[in-house]
Amino acid sequence: MSQGDLIWIRMPEDHMRWLISQTDPIIAKKMVEDGPHQIDCSEEVKRWSTGKGGEAAFEYYFKLKFVDWAVGTSKENKKPDLEPIGLRVGIKTVLMNNQNHIIPKKVEWPEVMIMSNGDGLAYAILGFAPMWVLRKHQNINKVRCLGIKAAGYKTGFDTPGYDDIIHFSTIDELRILAAEDEARERSSGGMAKNEQPKTASGS
């Protein structure tokens, strides 16, 4: 994946202030939950502003409406981010030059991978990570937070995996990639495997 493959997004100057106003109520609700929000190394604000910021940037760039700002429980919110627009695809965002993406060990849907510069104004869409890529490139040593490591249900996306991310430039292209990935999963039984299916392109 080259720099030329990235989609760069510049958000309005007041975006970060607006983003914090949207995520503060979510954080307040999450911090009284048991589970992942009690082990996140006291980084809830960074986690939510980064994650929701990436979703909002994707929405802004492609002129869509899908970001869920409702304050539900983690169980209620366990669904692909792009499901409201008919795509069983999630969005994962991480700070640039900080760490690798954190992903579930149990892969249930593909992800759009995004990076943020940290000020809430600049984002880069890296591309589409199929499920086999997410399974193949897992490395717990890429997780910095000891609490997340100990919990055991998340891991890091290993650096070589970024070379397997697929570039797209339109939502129609993303829909095609998602459909191909879903078909590959059905034909290969990949949902139960942490390896590249034999039918995958380039295998």
Image (spheres, rainbow, N blue to C red):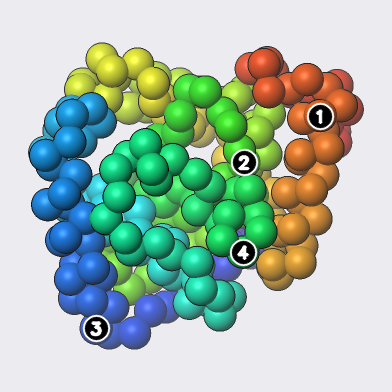
Q: Which mark is residue 186?
A: 1
**3D distance between C-alphas at marks 1 and 3:** 44 Å
Q: Is residue 102 above or below residue 10?
A: above
**Left or right of 69: which side holds 200?**
right
Residue 111: image x %, image y %?
57, 45
Does residue 34 appear left or right of residue 128 in this picture? Answer: left
Q: Amino acid at mark 3?
A: Asp
In depth, the one of 98 and 44 nearer the eye is 44
Q: CA distance from mark 1 to mark 4?
A: 22 Å
Select label 2 or label 4 by which is in front: 4
Residue 85, numbered label:
4
Residue at left 76%, top 62%? 173
Using the rendered image of the protein, determine whether residue 163 is visible from the camera's viewpoint: no
Q: Position of residue 183 (x, y in %)?
A: 83, 37
Give the alpha-carbon distance from disc 3 to disc 2, as whole Å.
31 Å
**Which is more foreground, mark 1 or mark 3?**
1
Q: Residue 110 has which mark? A: 2
Q: Spatial distance from mark 2 to mark 1, Cα to Cα? A: 14 Å
Q: Is the residue marked by circle 3 packed among few (<14), some (14-19), or many (20+) residues within 10 Å?
A: few
Q: Mark 4: which amino acid?
A: Ile
Residues under labels 4 and 3: Cα distance?
26 Å
Q: Earlier in the sequence, mark 3 or mark 2?
A: 3
Q: Secondary structure under badge 2?
A: loop
Viewer-side label of 4, 3: 4
Separation of disc 2 and disc 4 at Cα?
Answer: 15 Å
Could you tell me if the residues under marks 3 and 2 are in contact, i.e. CB atoms within 8 Å?
Answer: no
Q: Can you identify the residue that label 3 sits on? A: 14
Tags 1 and 3 in contact by the CB under 8 Å rule?
no
Point 62% across, 23% down: residue: 136
Q: Which residue type does callout 1 highlight?
A: Arg
- Amino acid found under the numbered disc labelled 2: Pro
